Structure formats: C-alpha cells, structure tokens
Image (cartoon, rainbow, N blue to C red):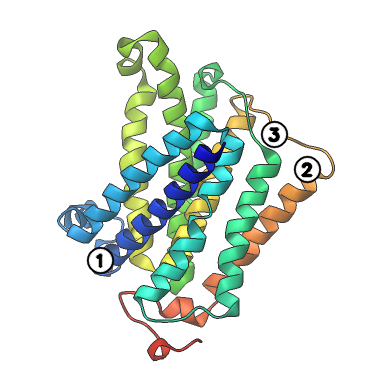
C-alpha cells in the first residue's frame, strides 16, 4: 500500500507538470490553429511540448506501478490531486498569486472529484459483454456530446470557451479509456483477436482525436479552465459507460451516494469559480496580471 500511494502521488506530480508544459506550448499557438491537425504538427516541433509528453508517459508508468500494488479505488482519487500541483505551478509561471477564489476552485475540483470516485468505487464489469448496438450508442452519445460542446464553445470566450473544448476532450478521453479496456481484454485471445477487432482502430482514432481536443483546450485558455474539466469529465464518462453498458458496479445507499453527490457538486462549483475568476481569465498566452500581485 505505501508503494501504491507514493507511485500515485508521483504520477500526479508528473501529470501536473506535463499539463503545465503542454499548455504553455499550446497557448503560444495562434487561434486559427485550434482544432486542426496543424496545431499538433506545430506542437511536435516544440521542445517544451515534447518534454510535457515525455512526462505524461512517465506518469502513466507510475500509474501502472501504483495499480500493481493497490486498487483502482485508491489510485484514481490520488492521481486527480494533480490539480493541486498543476494550477499553482501554472500561476507561478505567469508570476501571479492565486487568491481565495482560485484556491477554492482548485481544491473544490480536486477534493470533490477524489471524494466522488472514492465513495462510488466503480468495479467489476466486462467490456467484452457489450454488443454492437451498445457500442454504437456509446460512440453516438460521445459524438453528440463532443459536437454540442464544440458548438457551445463558439458562443463563449475566455476560460468558458477553453472549458467547453475541454469538455469535448474529456468525453473523448473517457471513451478512449473504455476502448482501451476492450482492447486489453482481447489480448488474452492473442494478437489476431486484437488486430481483427474494430475497437482497436477506433482506439487509435479516439486517441488522436482526444489529443487534438485536449491541446486545443490548452490553446484556447488557461490551464485551470481546461485541465479541471478534462480531469472531471474523463472518469465520469468512463464510469457511466462502465455501469450502463459493461455492468460495472458502484457503491450506493446512504451515506455513500450522498458523498458522491457532494463530490460532484464541489467539482461543478470549483469549475464555475475558476472560469468566472478575472485572474484565471487573464492567464493566457504567457500574459500575467497584476505584476505578480494577488488579484
């Protein structure tokens, strides 16, 4: 258990720094590159962005180590504490200090998400049990959510726009997790079973699409407005799909359900607090506010 805790926290720190570096590079790109493959093509040439991707790979390694020594119900809530490291680090790079509003938003999202995941404790289920109709419903619902979020982003500006694009990215990443589970499950039947399944190729498309949407969210606004929504959306989508389609089980009843609901309310309140913050709204494109003063 100590190894699982330490590895989870190491993964959280690596994910945090990786997110900061990726957002730092993406925010410097012009708006017209958003949601285009040109954005990824330019970012690949950026050394800072490549460092961020490298740290993300290292973070997945720590996450795998943590899962080897501890249950998902312990590891997942610890990893979402990356927000406690990422948002202050991002503000530090822009030479500003977070005020009470920003600290509340950051802590509310991190602890709210950890509380919801720890109390629900999704487990069990079998991705191989899903039929073609179930998969079509999953992909159709994800596509509808992505299209709706991107359409909404065109009506918004500042942190709210970044959050809308991040919602689309988080939805795709959550679906990617589901496709990954299905692909890994086929490994027991050999490589032929993996490469003959359409889910494997859908996983590649979802990975590329999710990467583009996440980087576009980073490019559109501050890290606090994008990473918080991605971290909240991805596990929620994965859990909902797991419960509805794959037969996963979540803990229910009083007071467990109440804790889960409180956690989700905290997440929503934290996101609204951050997106409506003038300080967070000014943290874009390498520009700080207030000359390093608290706002």
Q: Position of residue 116 (x, y in %)?
A: 67, 48
Q: Are marks 2 and 3 in contact (CB under 8 Å)?
A: no
For residue 42, say whether it is visible.
Answer: yes
> Which residue in the structure is indicated by mark 3?
250
Residue displayed at 64% across by 56% down: 112
Report how far apart the C-alphas of labels 1 and 3 lie in the structure: 42 Å
Residue 32 is labelled as: 1
User: Which numbered disc, 2 or 1, marks the residue closer to the eye?
Assistant: 2
For residue 156, say whether it is visible.
Answer: no
| Neighbourhood count class around disc 2 (C-alpha, 10 Å): few under 14, some 14–19, many 20 upward | some
Q: Position of residue 216 (x, y in %)?
A: 34, 58
Residue displayed at 59% across by 64% down: 107
With 177 as the anchor, is 244 left or right in this view?
right
Of 100 and 3, nearer the camera is 3
With 248 as the anchor, is 99 left or right in this view?
left
Helix, strand or loop at mark 3:
loop
Residue 256 is labelled as: 2
Mark 1 or mark 3: whose residue is earlier in sequence: 1
| Neighbourhood count class around disc 1 (C-alpha, 10 Å): few under 14, some 14–19, many 20 upward | few
- Asked if 184 appears above or below 235 in the picture, the reply is above
| Residue at the outermost front position | 2
Helix, strand or loop at mark 2:
helix
Of 150 and 79, nearer the camera is 79
Residue 175 is labelled as: none
């Amino acid at each position: 258990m100590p190894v699982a805790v330490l590895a989870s926290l190491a993964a959280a720190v690596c994910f945090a720094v990786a997110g900061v570096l990726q957002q730092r590079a993406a925010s410097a790109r012009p708006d017209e590159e958003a949601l285009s493959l040109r954005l990824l093509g330019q970012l690949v040439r950026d050394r800072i962005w490549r460092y961020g991707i490298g740290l993300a790979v290292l973070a997945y390694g720590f996450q795998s180590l943590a899962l080897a020594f501890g249950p998902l119900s312990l590891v997942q809530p610890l990893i979402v504490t990356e927000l406690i490291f990422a948002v202050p680090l991002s503000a530090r790079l822009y030479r500003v200090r977070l005020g009470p509003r920003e600290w509340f938003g950051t802590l509310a999202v991190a602890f709210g998400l950890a509380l919801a995941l720890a109390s629900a404790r999704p487990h069990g289920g079998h991705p191989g049990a899903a039929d073609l109709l179930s998969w079509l419903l999953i992909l159709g619902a994800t596509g509808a959510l992505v299209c709706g979020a991107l359409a909404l982003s065109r009506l918004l500006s500042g942190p709210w726009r970044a959050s809308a694009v991040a919602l689309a990215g988080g939805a795709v990443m959550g679906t990617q997790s589901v496709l990954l589970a299905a692909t890994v499950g086929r490994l027991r039947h050999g490589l032929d079973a993996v490469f003959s399944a359409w889910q494997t190729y859908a996983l590649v498309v979802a990975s590329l699409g999710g990467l583009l949407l996440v980087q576009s969210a980073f490019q559109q606004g501050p890290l606090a407005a994008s990473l918080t929504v991605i971290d909240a959306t991805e596990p929620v989508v994965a859990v909902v799909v797991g419960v509805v389609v794959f037969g996963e089980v979540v803990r229910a009843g009083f007071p467990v359900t109440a804790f889960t609901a409180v956690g989700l309310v905290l997440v929503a309140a934290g996101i609204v607090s951050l997106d409506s913050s003038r300080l967070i709204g000014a943290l874009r494109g390498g520009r700080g506010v207030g000359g390093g003063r608290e706002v």
